[in-house]
Amino acid sequence: MCKLKPLLNKWLEEADSSTGSPTSIDKIAAQGRKRKKRTSIEVSVKGALESHFLKCPKPSAQEITNLADSLQLEKEVVRVWFCNRRQKEKRMTPPGIQQQTPDDVYSQMGRDKILELDSGTMQPVSYIWENDLIRGGLCV
């Protein structure tokens, strides 16, 4: 209520003194809601955030602070980026399929057999078969 009182007083004064045109009321209302401008993140910074996300999708407050300091971003920007990235991951993963980590894939396949993982799905892109052929028809 404390924040609304000055806004309501201005509105009442204007309503009493003039015809109360909608444009002037909108101007007064716009003064009350201020939002921070959208932050644009550089490609190199986004790459660092993505690589950290792959290691740890839910960093602690201390990790967020350290990451923000090292990337020269506000702590809140980094926190929101991780929240948004987790939501994107949730959207992109079909229901019923559990998200795999690199360790899960390695334990299933054996470290020596995987050559490349898809960074988004963490599924093997290419690996060595028993007969040393790589998926895609290339030989080792």
Image: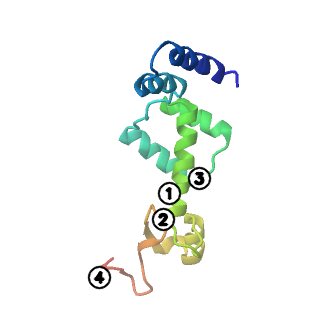
User: Looking at the image, which is closer to me, 19 or 125?
Assistant: 19
Could you tell me how far apart the alpha carbons at marks 3 and 2 are, in whole angstroms?
A: 15 Å
User: Which of pointers 1 and 3 lies earlier in the amino acid sequence?
Assistant: 3
Residue in view at x 40 percent, y 87 percent? 131
Provide the residue designation for mark 4.
137
Q: Is residue 1 left or right of residue 51?
A: right
The answer to the question of whether label 4 and label 3 lie on touching residues, with beta carbons closer than 8 A, is no
Secondary structure type for disc 4 = loop
Camera-side mark, 1 or 4: 1
**Label for residue 92?**
2
Q: Is residue 104 above or below residue 11?
A: below
**Label for residue 88?**
1
Provide the residue designation for mark 3.
57
User: Which of pointers 3 and 2 lies earlier in the amino acid sequence?
Assistant: 3
Q: Is residue 120 left or right of residue 82?
A: left
Tell me residue 78's x, y (percent): 54, 38
Seen from this angle, which residue lies furthest left?
138
Secondary structure type for disc 3 = loop
The answer to the question of whether label 1 and label 4 lie on touching residues, with beta carbons closer than 8 A, is no
Q: Is residue 80 above or below residue 22?
A: below
Crowdedness of circle 2 by 10 Å Cα count: few (<14), some, many (20+)? few
Residue in view at x 41 percent, y 38 percent? 41
Q: Amino acid at mark 2?
A: Met
The answer to the question of whether label 4 and label 2 lie on touching residues, with beta carbons closer than 8 A, is no
Q: Amino acid at mark 4?
A: Gly
